Amino acid sequence: MALYFAVVIVLIVISVTALTYNRLVTLRNMVREGWSGIDVQLMRRAALIPNLVETVEGYMVHERNLLAEIAELRARSLGTEKVGEKGEIETALSRSLGSLIAVAEGYPDLKASRNFLELQKELTDSEDQIQMARRYYNGTVRNLNIAVESFPSNLIARLFSFVQAEFFAIDDDNDRQAPQVSIESQK
């Protein structure tokens, strides 16, 4: 009877270990899938940048520094795979692209350019897709990190070298704040 009881306990432990391991593998793969989604959207946006810069260059003779900064950030973004570093670069790139669009407001001929308007719309769509991919990725990271930290799955995670994943976060406190809007009536 004791042998039967011991066999049942061993089978339960093996089953729980296998189920927990499979859950951790699933969560890790979801994190990888989420990162792939972000990467696809970042590549899509990166592909738009040369066309946008080329379109804008002819109009914005005095904005060379901003255009050079955008080109440099794009190259750095394409050259890194580290989540934290990529997050910092992408935050800076988004800010620079926003500045470029804001500066474009001062160039009526550019604002009227059909090519610029199409690129601006595609860039806005890309930013929306990046935000959706970022939310999905961060949700999968959260789920994996909870499993890696929670008992008893943390024991299995440690045994099989599962580690926490890094969130893809906004690093600039200014980006976390709501924009200040002031509406003044003219007399």
Image (cartoon, rainbow, N blue to C red):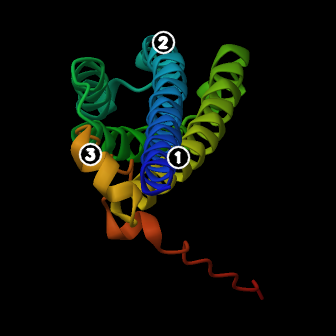
Question: Which kind of residue does numbered mark 2 sit on?
Answer: Ala
Q: Quadrant of residue 17?
A: top left
Q: Quadrant of residue 169?
A: bottom left
Q: Secondary structure at mark 2?
A: helix
Mark 3 burial class by Cα count in 10 Å: few <14, some 14-19, many 20+: some
Question: Which kind of residue does numbered mark 3 sit on?
Answer: Val
User: Looking at the image, can residue 151 be seen?
Assistant: yes
As measured in the structure, the alpha-carbon distance from the residue carrying label 3 to the one carrying label 2 is: 33 Å
As measured in the structure, the alpha-carbon distance from the residue carrying label 1 to the one carrying label 2 is: 27 Å
Q: Residue at label 3?
A: 163
Q: Nearer the viewer, mark 1 or mark 2?
A: 1
At horizontal 27% and vertical 39% (from top left) the residue drawn is 89
Q: Residue at label 1?
A: 140
As measured in the structure, the alpha-carbon distance from the residue carrying label 3 to the one carrying label 1 is: 13 Å
Q: Residue at label 2?
A: 47
Residue 155 pos. (x, y %): 29, 55
Q: Counting residues from the N terminus, which is met first, the one under dot 3 or under dot 2?
A: 2
Please say if 98 is above or below 62.
below
At horizontal 37% and vertical 51% (from top left) the residue drawn is 167
Circles 3, 1 touching at the beta carbon (< 8 Å): no
